[in-house]
Amino acid sequence: MILNYDPILSCIFSLLLINGFYNLAFKSSKTVGNFLDNKNFFFISIINFFLILSFLSLITFFYILIFPINLFLIKSVSYSIILFGLFKPTYLKKFSYLLKRDNLKIKIIYLILFSYFLLSLSPITDPDSLDYHVTIPQYIVSYEDNQFPNYWLTSQLSGICEILLIYGLAIGALNFSQILQFASLLFIILIILNFRLKKNIKNEKILYICLCILTIPAVVFLISTSKPQIFPIAINFIALILTCFYLTKNDNKLNSKYFFIIIYLLFVSTQIKYSFYLSSGLIVLLTVYEIYKKNYPINKIIIICILCFSFVILPREIYEYLYFNPNIFYNFFNAHTDLFSSKEYNLTLKTNTGNMRLIPIWMFIPQSLSQITYSLGVIILYLFFIINFKFNKKILIISTSYIFIGLILAQPVGRFFIEPFFVVTVFFNIQFQNIF
């Protein structure tokens, strides 16, 4: 299948779509902020951004499971979002002070982010994106069908983010997925830069942390592809912030609202990419523990989890049960679920890199120059020299659990471990006075 798009229009429409989604989120931030008793509309608008994108993805997924794809409806939604994208990008106000401060580190941060932005406008060339990340939504748009050929094995690895890309490809916005990756990274950096620190913590430490994150070689690879990894990392990061800073009041009514949003976001990230079952599951356990400590009723915890599971995860499980494999438990615990080829394919996913699990030096130092963008890089080891040893023990537990389980069960490649090191980078090295 040949993707024939105008590169200039692709970049313009992609930017307008992302900005449109954010402006829509910003316009509704006051209403949602009042609902959550939170006046930080910048943070609320970022939460809204991911809520809107995830909700649209899920609703579209439900729709195409039952009805034929309606391209006129898809294009109508896309062009409506683009109209919102014509308004001024308000999030740049939080970013504008980077241009005003005379600080070399801030200028370097700005330069790196601008370089990533340019990279997100480049053509897609990586094999996974051309195989299924961008080709699956293109197939749906071209043939108006979501039933893929049985021999297209990698099609079973797709998630709701590939469904979201339909809204870009339907109007020629081929770079939508890459710019979404960049926007997710930008929002993560903006959130970190706007943390309120304790008086004895210097702002310079924040800048070092941002530089460490931005110089991870694997980020270069992810920004240039349609592989949806930074997007769910941003979702889980927001969920972790909500867990650590907002589930602190003994207000069950307010806690119910935050708990529902947290669980919903964490479940959504599992449907974007299967590997996020590990990190999302660990954060879910932490969230349940934190809210239970606030004397929140256990029956309400169960009800909220069941509701989110039924809306977010269950439809995909039903789909795989009907079309791929009648073994529900096997489907849930494996990325590939085809009845005849899944065992061999899942084994290949876990071993195709050739890296040794017991000696994870590949996590920081690539085996060859061609694999440099698969690693976390040696710069991230700098964090262990500035680490704050008064860190949150619960964050330590979930981070080390992720690395330990990942080394045993997951694909041994550096970019898989970006998330735990990212969490360690932020939550171990900064003592927060408050969120924003």
Image (cartoon, rainbow, N blue to C red):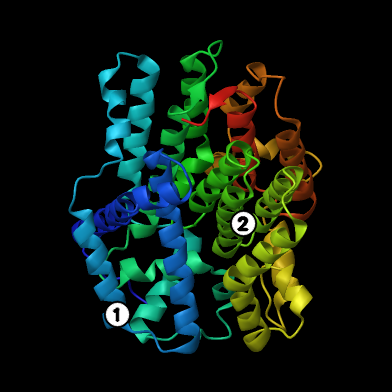
Q: Which amino acid type corresponds to the residue marked 2 in the rendered image?
A: Ile
Residue at the location (30% across, 73% down)? 170
Kindly identify which residue carries mark 1: 73
Pick whichever of labels 2 and 1 is earlier in the sequence. Answer: 1
The image quarter in which residue 392 lies: top right
Q: Nearer the viewer, residue 194 or 18?
A: 194
Q: Nearer the viewer, residue 312 or 272?
A: 312
Judge the density around disc 1: few (<14), some (14-19), many (≥20) Cα neighbours within 10 Å: few
Classify residue 422 as left or right of residue 179. right
Residue at the location (65% across, 63% down)? 304
Tag of residue 234: none
Classify residue 61 as left or right of residue 337. left
Q: Which amino acid type corresponds to the residue marked 1 in the rendered image?
A: Leu
Classify residue 322 as left or right of residue 152. right
Q: Nearer the viewer, residue 388 or 431?
A: 431
Answer whether residue 212 is visible to the viewer in this image.
yes
Residue 331: horizontal and vertical position, in percent?
A: 72, 75
Residue 230: horizontal and vertical position, in percent?
A: 50, 48
Q: Nearer the viewer, residue 382 or 319?
A: 319
Residue at the location (37% across, 41% down)? 41
Kindly identify which residue carries mark 2: 263
Does residue 160 lie above or below 217 as drawn? below
Task: Indicate the quadrant containing the N terminus: top left, top right, bottom left or bottom right.
Answer: bottom left
The image quarter in which residue 257 lies: bottom right
Judge the density around disc 2: few (<14), some (14-19), many (≥20) Cα neighbours within 10 Å: many
Residue at the location (46% across, 65% down)? 55
Residue 209: horizontal and vertical position, in percent?
A: 52, 25
Could you say whether the residue bearing mark 1 is in a helix, strand or loop? helix
Residue 329: horizontal and vertical position, in percent?
A: 78, 74
User: Distance from label 2 to label 1 (Cα)?
Assistant: 30 Å
